[in-house]
Amino acid sequence: MFWTLAKILVFVAVVIGLAFGAGQLMDSGQTVGLRIVDMEFELGPVQAAIALGLFVLAVWLGLKLLGLLVSVLRFMNGDETALRRFFAHNREKRGLDALLAALLAQASGDGKTAVAKAEKAHALLNRPVITSLLIAQSAELKGNRPLAEEHYKRLLEDTRSRFVGVQGLIRAKLEEGDTDKARKLAQKALDMQPAHEATQNTLLKLQTDAEDWQGARKTLQIKKSSGHLPRDVYRRRDAILALQNADALAATDNMTRAREAAIEANRLSPDLIPAAVAAARALVAQGKGGYAAKAIKKAWKVQPHPELAAAFAAIEPDETPLQRVSRFRKLLALHPDHAETRLLKAELLIGAEDFPAARRALGDLATTAPTVRALAIMAAIERGEGADDAVVRGWLARALTASRGPQWVCSNCQHVHAGWQAICDNCGAFDTLEWRDAPDSAGPSATQTELLPLIVGSLPSRPAAPDDADVVAGDVVIDDAEEAGETPPPKPA
């Protein structure tokens, strides 16, 4: 209300002021002379004021026309103008709408629509990084590998998107099966961003698959330095890579460097069983049996293992069975109650033909933890003590359906391996093999072999030439003795 009243008062004051000014101008009686070329004009006060207003209006119109002319010339020359900005804004709006539609289609899994909308956005927008990335990802979703690869290569032209472009090309090469090219690209990507964990894992996997052990060790070092790998895990895996490198060097008859690599692997991870075995063999070859024994004992102290026992036996291959039993005492004393220790001791005593002592060493393993090895040892003991053939056959028949005991099992896919390997044969995982009992498939077998101990054990003994059971028993004893590096015991008459 007050503001409306104030505006009315101001308007009235302006009108009064103009009227007063016009009256004063007319009462002045003065004239204004205007001369244009040879013509002279004499204007009164009011006429002069009107002429001045018309002149100002003409000047303003002239300036506007001049500005319009300049704008037309700039438009024709391609310069930024209001008209051009209008068309550009409309183009950008349509491009953004297409970009949004492409993103929504990609999120919903519609690769065909995503590619079409992304290409439309690419044509409308001047944002090559965004649109090329979207087209490449949409093409991957659709399965159009050449289109995806083309746009990933375009991303290499911009420093901001170069790393993403290399990552896309790595995936494309892996899909094509070109692992060599993918490995080179992964190395470039790691050089760009050394701390990128996914790139580290990809490159490490490609290097181990290609048996590039030296390159894999460098990548593993970068992975540890960037904080993505604990120190103890790093040392173990570095030892595994060094051990694999030793095998590769041995395959090329470079035995000196192979032995050095095996010893280095054991130094990096003394509790790694394959490294301890390889280092012991290398040290024995260098005439350092004492150091080899120390390496075996250090690994045995962490976990007893039959391969360690075989390597320990190989330090003195020409010793007698009794000498071997004596030399093994210090090793066996490290874990006297461990199942592997009891089995090994029983095998050593069988080799020395001390069957009662072998029975005492084995204890109740054949009944409380019946494995193929424990039951075979029990059959050998019975045979050595002159037991009836039916008793021996009964133990061997039980071994047919018994557990095989600890084996090298992949923790990733549960695949059982005959020997230790750095890479699982089944799933390709690295450093996943563990020495433990394999998963047991419960339930009776299709052939009902569980009844064999009852059937075979009830057969009467036959005083004939050595039968199949004798052969089996002899083979088992020989295999176990050779596994421990022993001289197999002679078969009793």
Image (tube, helix red, strand yellow):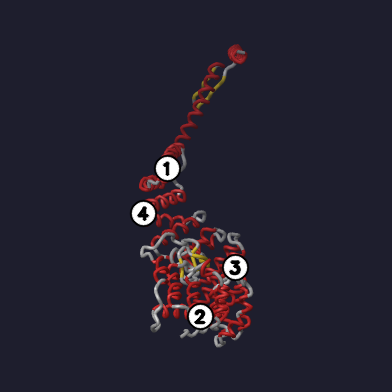
Type of amino acid under label 3: Arg
Quadrant of the rendered structure where residue 291 is?
bottom right
Type of amino acid under label 2: Glu
Q: Which mark is residue 385?
A: 2
Image-based side of 78 in relation to 487, left or right: left
Viewer-closest of 359 and 419: 359
Viewer-closest of 435 and 187: 435
Image-based side of 32 in relation to 490, left or right: right
Type of amino acid under label 4: Asn
Q: Which mark is residue 144?
A: 4
SS at badge 3: helix
SS at badge 2: loop
Viewer-closest of 231 and 219: 231
Type of amino acid under label 1: Leu
**On screen, 2 above or below 196?**
above
Q: Counting other residues with Cα less than 10 Å from the Cα at mark 4, is it few (<14), some (14-19), or many (20 or more)?
A: some
Q: Counting other residues with Cα less than 10 Å from the Cα at mark 3, is it few (<14), some (14-19), or many (20 or more)?
A: many
Counting residues from the start of the chain, the first of labels 2 and 1 encountered is: 1
Counting residues from the start of the chain, the first of labels 4 and 3 encountered is: 4
Mark-to-mark CA distance, 2 and 1? 81 Å
Q: Which mark is residue 235?
A: 3
Counting residues from the start of the chain, the first of labels 4 and 1 encountered is: 1
Coordinates of residue 182 in the picture (x, y in percent): 45, 64
SS at badge 4: loop
Q: Which dot, 2 or 1, sits closer to the camera?
A: 2
According to the image, label 1 marks what residue? 104
Counting residues from the start of the chain, the first of labels 4 and 2 encountered is: 4
Viewer-closest of 384 and 145: 384
Mark-to-mark CA distance, 1 and 3? 46 Å
